Image: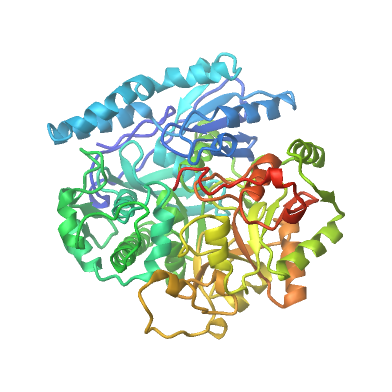
């Protein structure tokens, strides 16, 4: 039976597909004697721990813990990010009034316990493995949160802690920052407490839940299971699976539909749990799946074969079908013109591109921190509007500020850190700096660029980016193998001046957050022979356009459009490069190596610069050239971080 959300946001329903669990949730306002508005959202204990600070309806800060600890997808309580926010408030003479956790741990424990009981005694080994951690850390998570907050210097935290539902946090992160007064909201991920997919409607300051799909039937877990089967790491390798898909043919797609997942017209689905092991075991798939896909799972770091390429193409094909079916049903059932997306599946930019291509909705907006990190922001926003009853004001450009919501560092701080690192550097005026950057880009140099506030979410959007000339035919291979230390097949994204985007790409609307894939325009493509060797390295090296380093095998690209108002520095660099070359596009990839979080401060940036084959480092208005650095500062970053 469906119940209403309340604060602490009560849970709802338990049925397994959209068609049988329809509910409208009312939201109760929490009454406060003083209507304080400083709210800090927290996500933690699964992956991508983060905090987000909201004050008077405005997003002030949003930071992932991994950027401080240098542990990729850090799951621990975000102590460093929290202290950063508290110190920021202290400098303004303010304090946090409400702390909101992004999910309800007791409901999650309920799901875990019920699942093990349902699969007993098969799942006993997994039960023994997981239960001590849950009892120690998660069943009594409220007391753990209070202790962590007290350790960070928060007074009387027990009176300030609240809990949101996981998928409500995702929905709020998508709708409230969006430029829409009203919208349908679709959230898709692995699993929250019980929910794996939710459909809601947002109107002004309210969100009303309409329908859900429940665990174990999950599009996110389905995609992660195939990520595991293809030898990639779950919760980080999904990007690789998506990037690998265009190299293959979807010859297993029908097998997936016939044997593994039943797809309904309304987009709901039902998994055949015979082929999965995540409910009762320690792996994502069971041995039963091996016969369907010509053998056992690929082992990590083994050579990729055409089988893995075809499997990737097949599951991507099925995922897109489900997303499109869901979208069509949501449009018809809600009669909404706009759609907001969040949850880990919303980071599948290929599916997002197909969704926009189909024109099911007039407008689509995707939360740039769509995964669990964004849950911290959603929890804070949900509390702000649904518990405090704040009045929402629409920002027609969205409220994410380009997702530049993290720390930034003054010239004084940068100079101090560079001196501490014994770096050789010079400082330049802005105009001279832009000219030097442009000259080095056109000379084929790879540049690490750090400036302004750090990005929130998985994408680097110009402020913590590696940039390079996309016209150079070997640049993709060089950056992958010599700088990022990752697989050569992985594509790079183009950053393009927004005004020039439609001249180069079949793009329907601006894409500031690099969350949609578009095809290169026909007149920019260079057709290649399809009679090619199946060796992936040979395929990667084929030249398919005037900008080969950002053109994927299927002539697609994950486009970032850059607007001057949102990022003046990055826009100026692109404009200068265009004036010199006629090309308004640069490679933009995150400033890190494989397995490393995106760099946060000057020390992180310099270490990465000296541990890779980057040629130039820009931090604010300071420049470091590799050939001018002390050889004693050189390191090898290739094996520094755990492989992703």
Would residue 217 be seen by someone viewing this image from the given angle? Answer: yes
Q: Quadrant of the N terminus?
A: top left
Outermost left residue: 121
- Total marks shown come to 0
Residue 52 lies, in percent from the top left, at 57, 36
Q: Quadrant of residue 289?
A: bottom left
Outermost front residue: 631
136 over 513 or under it: above or below: above
Colouring rule applied to residues: rainbow
Residue 271 lies, in percent from the top left, at 21, 52
Would residue 553 be seen by someone viewing this image from the given angle? Answer: no
Of residue 131 and residue 184, the one placed in the foreground of this image is: 131
Q: Residue at x 85, y 50 (%)?
A: 427
| Left/right of residue 607 with respect to residue 509 in the rendered view | right
| Left/right of residue 76 with respect to residue 195 in the rendered view | right
Q: Residue at x 65, y 69 (%)?
A: 469
| Left/right of residue 343 with respect to residue 56 in the rendered view | left
| Left/right of residue 137 with respect to residue 637 in the rendered view | left
Of residue 145 and residue 265, the one placed in the foreground of this image is: 145
270 over 134 or under it: above or below: below
Residue 218 lies, in percent from the top left, at 29, 49
Residue 266 lies, in percent from the top left, at 28, 60
534 over 9 or under it: above or below: below
Q: Residue at x 56, y 17 (%)?
A: 151
Q: Residue at x 52, y 47 (%)?
A: 369
Of residue 616 and residue 345, the one placed in the foreground of this image is: 616
């Amino acid at each position: 039976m469906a119940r209403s959300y309340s604060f602490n946001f009560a849970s709802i329903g338990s049925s397994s597909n959209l068609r049988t669990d329809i509910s409208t949730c009312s939201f109760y306002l929490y009454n406060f004697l003083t209507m304080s508005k400083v709210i800090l959202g927290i996500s933690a204990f699964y992956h991508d721990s983060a905090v987000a600070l909201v004050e008077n309806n405005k997003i002030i800060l949003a930071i992932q813990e991994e950027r401080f600890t240098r542990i990729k997808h850090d799951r621990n309580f975000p102590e460093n990010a929290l202290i950063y926010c508290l110190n920021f408030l202290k400098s303004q003479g303010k304090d946090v009034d409400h702390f909101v956790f992004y999910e309800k741990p007791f409901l999650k424990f309920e799901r875990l316990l019920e699942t093990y009981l349902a699969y007993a005694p098969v799942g006993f080994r997994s039960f023994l493995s997981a239960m001590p951690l849950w009892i120690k850390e998660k069943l009594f998570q409220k007391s753990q949160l209070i202790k962590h907050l007290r350790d960070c210097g928060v007074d009387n935290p027990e009176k300030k802690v609240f809990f949101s539902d996981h998928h409500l946090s995702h929905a709020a992160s998508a709708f409230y920052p969006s430029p829409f007064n009203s919208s349908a909201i679709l959230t898709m991920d692995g699993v929250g407490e019980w929910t794996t997919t939710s459909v809601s409607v947002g109107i002004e300051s309210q969100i009303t839940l309409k329908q859900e799909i429940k665990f174990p039937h999950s599009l996110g877990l389905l995609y992660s299971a195939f990520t595991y089967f293809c030898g990639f790491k779950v919760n980080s390798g999904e990007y690789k699976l998506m990037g690998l898909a265009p190299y293959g043919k979807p010859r297993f797609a029908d097998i997936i539909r016939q044997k593994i997942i039943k797809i309904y017209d309304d987009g709901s689905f039902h998994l055949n749990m015979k082929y999965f092991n995540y409910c009762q075991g320690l792996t994502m798939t069971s041995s039963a799946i091996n016969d369907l896909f010509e053998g056992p799972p690929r082992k990590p770091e083994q050579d990729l074969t055409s089988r893995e390429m075809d499997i990737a193409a097949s599951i991507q094909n099925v995922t897109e079908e489900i997303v499109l079916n869901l979208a069509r049903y949501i449009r018809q059932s809600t009669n909404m013109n706009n759609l907001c997306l969040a949850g880990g599946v919303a980071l599948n930019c290929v599916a997002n591109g197909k969704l926009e291509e189909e024109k099911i909705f007039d407008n689509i907006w995707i939360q740039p921190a769509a995964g669990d990190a964004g849950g911290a922001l959603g929890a804070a926003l949900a509390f702000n509007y649904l518990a405090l009853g704040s009045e929402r004001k629409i920002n027609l450009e969205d409220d994410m500020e380009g997702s530049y919501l993290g720390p930034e560092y003054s010239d004084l701080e940068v100079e101090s850190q560079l001196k501490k690192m014994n770096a050789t550097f010079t400082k330049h005026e802005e105009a001279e700096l832009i000219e030097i950057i442009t000259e080095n880009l056109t000379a084929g140099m790879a540049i690490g660029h750090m400036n302004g506030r750090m990005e929130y979410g998985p994408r680097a959007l110009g402020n913590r980016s590696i940039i390079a000339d996309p016209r150079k035919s070997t640049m993709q291979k060089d950056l992958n193998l010599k700088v990022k230390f990752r697989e050569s097949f992985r594509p790079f994204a183009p950053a393009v001046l927004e005004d020039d985007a439609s001249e180069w790409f079949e793009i329907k609307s601006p894409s500031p957050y690099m969350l949609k894939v578009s095809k290169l325009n026909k007149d920019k493509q260079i057709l290649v022979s399809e009679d090619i060797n199946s060796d992936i390295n040979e395929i990667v090296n084929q030249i398919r356009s005037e900008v080969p380093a950002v053109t994927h095998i299927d002539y697609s690209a994950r486009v970032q459009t850059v607007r001057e108002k949102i990022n003046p520095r990055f826009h100026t660099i692109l404009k200068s490069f265009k004036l010199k070359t006629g090309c308004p596009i640069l490679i933009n990839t995150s400033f890190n190596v494989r397995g490393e979080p995106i760099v946060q401060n000057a020390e992180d940036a310099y270490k990465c610069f000296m541990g890779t084959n980057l040629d130039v480092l820009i931090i604010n208005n300071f420049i470091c050239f590799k050939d001018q650095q002390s050889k004693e500062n050189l390191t090898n970053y290739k094996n520094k971080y755990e492989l992703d």
